[in-house]
Amino acid sequence: MDSKALLFYKDKLNALSKEVNKYNNINKYTAVAKLVSFVFAVGLFIFWYFNSIFNILFLTVPFLVYIFLVIFGQKYIDLYARYKSLHELISDEISFFNKDYNVFRPNTHFIDYNHNYAYDLDIFEKGAIYHSINRCTTADGEELLKQLLLSPKRNNEDIIKIQDSVKEMIPLRELSHNISSISYKNPVSLDNFIKAVSRDITPPKKSTVIYAYISASITILSLIAYSLGLIPSFIPLGLFIYQFATASLFAKKTNDEYAKLNKANNAAKIYLLISETIKDTDFQSEMLKSIKNDICALSSKIKELQKINREFDQRNSGLYYLISNGLLLKDIILSYKINKWIKENINDIPAWNKAAAYIDVINSISVFGYNNSDFIFPAINESTIIKAENMSHPLIESSKRIGNNIEISKIHKFLIITGANMAGKSTFIRSIGVNLILASMGAPVCASSFEFSSVDIFSSMRTSDKLMDSSSYFHAELQRLKLLKENAEKSEKMLVLLDEILKGTNSQDKLQGSKLVLLKFIKLNITGILATHDTALGSLSEEYKENFENYFFDFEVDKSGEMHFDYKLKKGVSNNMNASILLKNVLND
């Protein structure tokens, strides 16, 4: 994150703190008012019961005041929750900038040690690329972001569409934060919840609902009749108790249904909020227009579900629950409504999911772009594989970045990079891989200029213990190279990233084996980069001038024996190695 973004977040956090405090105070006052009206209502009822000196309709006044406060208060409860979520989101952005990686979701369970490159390039580690980008508020968005990072080969039109959408979204910070803050701490999938609920719940029969409406009408009419002095008080009171008792008889079943329904409703609220958040935005990019149309097309259905959700929220109030079931048998009616809505809309939910996933991912990438305003959007160039100037790893702090230039324009070619330990070889290779993945998913990259074409990517940079399965390290390396070969034979164009292959054997074997591997690979549809300490591999460029180029990272030793690295890529073969110097420094310590 750059300093401009950090300053913006700090200013926004201060403004949000004031809003959170304001709505928190309103909710406290409303809670006190509800308590007072409830106590007054109960006291008035007891007084009337023993004295009966005024009409029973007067009892409805404090009850109506209480219900009004419940409905009125819900608005400010929602506003408080909204601003509190925004406050937490912005606070987490600042924490992430300060390297507190306990915020946001890294989803380290996505790590696949057998994937073509994800483990080598640390895609899903804490604080790594996925973690830096992910601000998704839906589980479907998180899954889509994962797939974009794991499958970089895609057509140019799709890349440009995502790029255009991200570019449009980057300046829309308020919209972006409103989307992320909806449920970034606990993303859910509406599709999974609705399907689970629709399988497990048996909705009330239509005849039961008709009975509920008729019974509620009779109870209300009896109350009116009593107020006009036409019938005694025990009739409306008895009907009220009867209806509440009827609802109570099925309380356990109803509560079990509501527990599942509320789970679905909580998920649905996320999609409703996304719809409400974007509906008034006049998007210009093709993809964002399409997403908005898909999410907002069923606005009437969304509003219907939102109304049902609101009724569920109000049901949580004890007095409202008593009155709504005693007078209206509300539970039966609500259960029917939500199941009817599911039946009518379940086939449209996948389209909503897909649209929500894409707005989620586009928004997440836009946050990444805003947080790194010095990054640039790459250009697609089919005549090259990668051509970059001043390219660096996107996770290195801007003050510590040292960029390098790189150009690979054709397949059947390898760059051999030699150099000392800690000189920057591995970081440079990872920089190429990570930036190329970002470019292929429509995200900005860490460079001053970047051209690329979409290619398959494969790496062999380290062998995890999890891949060995009791076999030797060398055998695990061989299996990895075999997998690389099999993938390359199926690919039209592949970039291969190798770091010190065949480490599990002796020096002479390693040198001969490395030559054998490279000479085999240049016959496939591969272009690649190999980082190695074997300077003898530099001789391949003499015999195979079209297939190999040599580069190196160097260092200098000052008079006190301290090493200094410039981390700049140079053409040629390294003449300096530093293992003995490092060992000497360690042993002297």
Image (cartoon, rainbow, N blue to C red):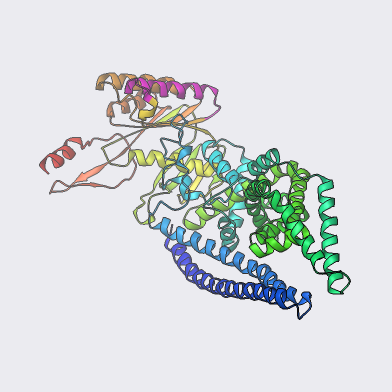
Residue at position x 65%, y 47% in the image: 252
Relative horizontal placement of residue 261, taking residue 512 as reference (left or right): right
Residue 209 percent across, percent down from the top left: 81, 50
Principal secondary structure, stretch drawn in magenta = helix
Residue at the bottom extreme of this rendering? 53
Q: Position of residue 259 (x, y in %)?
A: 63, 48
Q: Quadrant of the C terminus?
A: top left
User: Of 78 and 11, which appears nearest the observer?
Assistant: 78
Would residue 231 appear left or right of 182 to someone viewing this image?
right
Q: Is residue 345 above or below residue 502?
A: below
Residue closest to the far left:
588
Q: Quadrant of the N terminus?
A: bottom left
Q: Position of residue 493 (x, y in %)?
A: 53, 29
In this picture, residue 256 sits left or right of residue 577: right
Where residue 574 sits, quadrant-wise, is: top left
* Residue plotted at (46% across, 22% down): 485
Q: Position of residue 92 (x, y in %)?
A: 45, 58
- Which residue appears at 72% of the width and 49% of the height? 294
> Is residue 22 placed above or below 584 in the rendered structure?
below
Residue 5 in the magenta stretch? The answer is: no
Is residue 298 at least partly visible in the picture?
A: no
Relative to 327, say whether 265 is above or below: above
Q: Can residue 137 be seen in the rendering of this structure?
A: yes
Highlighted magenta segment, given as a residue range: 468-493
Which one is in front, 535 or 239? 239
Image quadrant in which you'd find residue 397: bottom left
Query: Which corner quadrant of the image does residue 145 belong to?
Result: top right
